[in-house]
Image: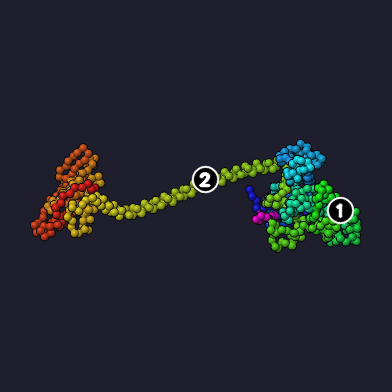
Amino acid sequence: MAKNTSIGIDIGNSQIKVVLLKKSGNGVKIERFFVENYGLSPKELSSPITVVNKRMEIISKIFKELKPVNVVVAVAKGEDNIRTIQMPLMTEQSLRQALRWGGQPDYIPFDLKEMTWDVVISQVYRRKEEIKAEGKEKMDVIIALAKKNIVNSYLDIFESSNALIDILDSNTLSGSNFTCFNYAIPKDKIWGKIDFGAEMTTVNVLEGSNLKFTLNIPWGVNDITELAQAVTGITGWKEAQEIVHSMDFNVPENPVMQALEPKIKDFVRQLNGAISFYESKNQGSVVSEVMLSGGGAMLCGMDRFISSKINREVKIENEINRSLINYDKKDEVQLKMLLPQLNVAIGAAMRNLVELRNTANLLPFDIMLGRKLKSRRTSTVVILAAALALLFTGVYLKYSAFSKDRAKLLEISAEFDAHKGTAGDLLNMKDAVDTFQTINENYATLNKNSTRWSEALIELSSLVPKNTFIANANWSARSQQFLLKTDKKFQQEQQEIVEKFGNSKNFSGMKLGRTNETDSTYDYDISRVVTRTRSTASSNPQSGGGQSGNVFGGQSNSQGGAR
């Protein structure tokens, strides 16, 4: 699952540095940062129990302000170990097996059973010009190691604060990752990095982002402070630290600098030896530039002092590429001042947010495996819960839709019932038209009153049952006759027909005559005789006659099959 925030923690020898990062576009944003001093004297720092308790206290304090999730911890310098070796090209699985069974003992003078370790294949050589000496494909390998008891102490510290460590990173690799990301180092640039810490100084040589060589020098800022304390006679540790941070290391007349000269010579010799060793092993490769980080980089004139001793350009790592690492403007001054100390914590936090080159993890394998299994179980439960939620949501939505449809149907039904009477009248009119659509005007001489004629048609359609049709119609001025045919099974409608005609407005007086039965039908002869006066007939030969309800007049004889 992608992470949006990450906490990087640099467990130093005299300080703990913490950075909260947030994912931002292609880079990150620094949301918060802390630098907490142990406040311990050299004597107290030499006690592992005292140091562990102080670390627990500081971590607990920090996690009261930050939620302890997505935590990456960088092991303190000197508590981890980095080896860079070159081996024949093989898969990572084969590499791990080779190391596990004692491969490359000259380069790894440790019993791996007592260590937690991880590997990074940092570069592969396949091109002919790259392998011309040996003629075999090869690869650069970074091996990160830490003693199991040290790793367990880190786990205990964070478990005491109810926090889990996502990644236990190497201090060296975290710092290198930050510098490579922040400065966008070209892949062919050969450069060095000196991390000048409190108890330990690390010298790294890199080609682009590929770590080629590393060396730990057991000398740091605390050694300078102890000597300053001895030279000045100051007993307080904080007062001695203030003297060291106020002195200019480019002024040789300073009594502290004069006392430091033998130590500094040995320190410079090891710096030059590390860089020269790499250049001698890689003919034509020259370290052109050195980045200076750590608490020692904040000492006045230390960059110029080291530059004069190793004859190379030295830059303090206090610049931030804002296109990749953003921050609030209000934090700019303090952030740049503390950046030499914060770079490892930032590099650690980036492990969860951006793609980096060096990705070792010193957490024990069984812990990582257990977390993966737990994560899979959790993911399975989450997926099942989500599936059930979707199912119930679907059922609910479907029921809601059904309820809405049912309510709509009831509404339509009520509306239909409201118009039922009107609809019935319209259907009767339609039946009348359908019944007589093929009857010619010659069936009758119509009265000029068309409204009355249409009324008669409607009434006739209601008198004739649906399963009955007019087979023959005869009428004259004195008589009207309809021959109706119906399906045999509807013979019970005989009396109904007579009653309907007898009670009608326009066809009253019609009486049932003979009835003929065939195999499948009944024929009903319905007729009446109209009594007319001469004066009425002569004055209006085509009128409806003396019966006010009769709309037929004249004389006509027609046959049809209209329903």
Along the line of sight, the residue nearer the viewer: 53 or 391: 391
Identify the main secondary structure in magenta.
strand
- Three-letter amino acid code at disc 2? Leu
Mark 1 vs mark 2: in front: 1
Q: Which residue occupies 23% across, 45% down?
A: 468
Residue 420, position as x, y percentages in the image: 31, 53
Q: Amino acid at mark 1?
A: Val
Give x and y (percent) for residue 124: 73, 44
Q: Position of residue 259 (x, y in %)?
A: 91, 56
In front: 488, or 537?
Answer: 537
Q: Residue furthest left?
A: 534
In this view, 297 is above or below 561 = below
Color scheme of the displayed model = rainbow
Residue 25 is inside the magenta segment: yes
Q: Is residue 520 left or right of residue 321?
A: left
**Any part of residue 127 in sight:** yes
Residue under the image location 69 percent in, 43 percent down: 368
Which residue is found at the position 24% from the left and 40% from the top? 489
Secondary structure under tag 2 reads helix
Which portion, as a residue range, is magenta? 20-27
At a point 19% along the width and 43% down the height, the residue shown is 523
Within 10 angstroms of label 2, few (less than 14), some, or many (20 or more) residues? Answer: few
Element type at mark 1: helix
Which tag, 1 or 2, sits closer to the chain's start? 1
The residue indicated by pointer 2 is 391
Magenta-drawn stretch contains 471: no
Cα distance between the residues tagged 1 and 2: 70 Å
Residue 45 makes an appearance in the image: no
Of residue 62 and residue 479, the one placed in the foreground of this image is: 479
In the rendered image, residue 391, in percent from the top left (x then y), is placed at 52, 45
Q: Name the disc covering residue 268, or none.
A: 1
